[in-house]
Amino acid sequence: MRRISRPFLAVAWSALCATVLACPCMASDVERDLTRDAVDIDKRIAASGLLYGDARLDSYLQGVADRLRRPDDAESVRVRVLKGPWPNAFVLPNGSTYVTTALLDVLGNEAQLACVIGHEMTHLSGHHAAEELRAQRTRLAWTTVLAVIVGAAGAYYGGGQVGSLLADLTADAGELWTLSAVSGYSRDHEREADRRGFERIVAAGYDSAQAPAVFELLLAETPDASSEPRPYFASHPKLEERAASMGELLASSPSTQQGRSDTEIFQSALGELPLDQAMMLIDAGQATAAQRSVERYLARNPHSARGHYAAGEAWRASSAVPDWQERALAEYGLAATLEGAPPDALRKKGLLHRERGETAAARDSFEKFLALDPGAVDAGLIRLYLQELSEPRN
């Protein structure tokens, strides 16, 4: 992965600041640009293939947002799930709110989810995007240095298909995407969103102790890479600030009633999203993170055939671990014994046995695979392998 040096980013930021000072932006232009850009980003996301596209999950998330709505909210939000290997959430000025699969995978319950959504809803109701851009950014300024800033951030969405799509979107979507999804808001706006978002979750009856827990989970999940630009919710300095802010709010909260967390409801709504997320992480070359996703899922669903298959895939992608083959074979083998076993578990098991020279075990796995999926795309190749394994060795 290409690193971008701190001095280079510092030069880019200096260029941005200089251009901002030279080119003040009128309020009407900011509002017009924000409205246009929000619609444009929605269209780009819809066309990109990055939407997770689970209508049931989207409906559940929308229900959480609706419970957090306040009587004085002029704008309504529409929540959807975006594929992404890094935890992130953001709201656009038209109310479109996106949470990534990675963020949902890390969260443990509905109260934590409400904390995230409530925070984003406050950015919307407070018109923070307009205030930020009006105060310090202009379209000309961003045009001058945008390629440097978003190019750096886009690189850290990981490799693989999803990472490439996100990098493309980041490079093309412009200043609003960068503010909302990558760089985040000013400290004052973040603290305001923390405070008013905290008030939302308390008013909605959620367990307020889950608010600081969100950022503790994110800190534990995302490795510290302070020298590298990261999407907003994967940036350690900002996560640490948010955790401290939420801790202060909890300590000063007059409410003594413990609200609800709704852990089981939340996990049921996620369904197999953690396994989908694990496969995205494997594709992005993040096998260790994929293993964590699978482990969390299997702790709740120990008899999931697809869960153990995903665990096998994560170990197969961990070739730096000395016993990765044994671990992968064990997970594939367990998956094959469970209800709803993916036939591919047997194919992958057979391939590993073949690589290891374990002829009998490879033949057994390949034969069972073909029995389950005789019309597989590579069925012909597997039959050739069986023929090869049946031939006597000289």
Image (cartoon, grey):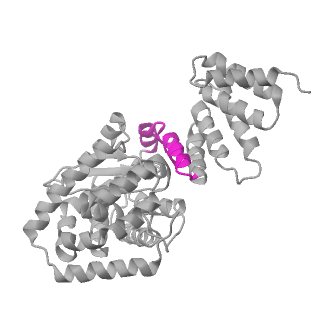
Q: Main secondary structure of the magenta part?
A: helix
- Classify residue 134 as left or right of residue 152: left
Image coordinates of residue 350 in percent, x first then y, are 72, 30
Q: Is residue 199 in sight in this rendering?
A: no
Name the residue rendered at 21%, 65% in the picture: 129
Q: Is residue 284 visible?
A: yes
Which residues fall within the magenta stretch? 263-286
Q: Nearer the viewer, residue 386 or 227?
A: 386
Residue 60 relative to residue 94: left or right: right
Q: Quadrant of the C terminus?
A: top right
Indicate left or right for 153 with 73 as reference. Answer: right
> Which percent across, then down, holds residue 210?
42, 57
Residue at 25% across / 64% down in the picture?
A: 175
In percent of width and height, residue 334 lies at 69, 32
Whether 101 is among the magenta residues is no
Pick the front one: 332 or 263: 332
Of the pair 97 and 228, the residue shown nearer to us: 228
Q: Is residue 267 magenta?
A: yes
**Does 100 appear above or below 383?**
below
Q: Is residue 45 above or below residue 9?
A: above
Counting from the top left corner in percent of width and height, residue 393 is at 89, 26
Farthest residue to the left: give it: 28
The residue shown at (49%, 74%) is: 227
Q: Residue at x 66, y 22 (%)?
A: 369
Q: Which residue is situated farthest in the front direction here?
A: 394
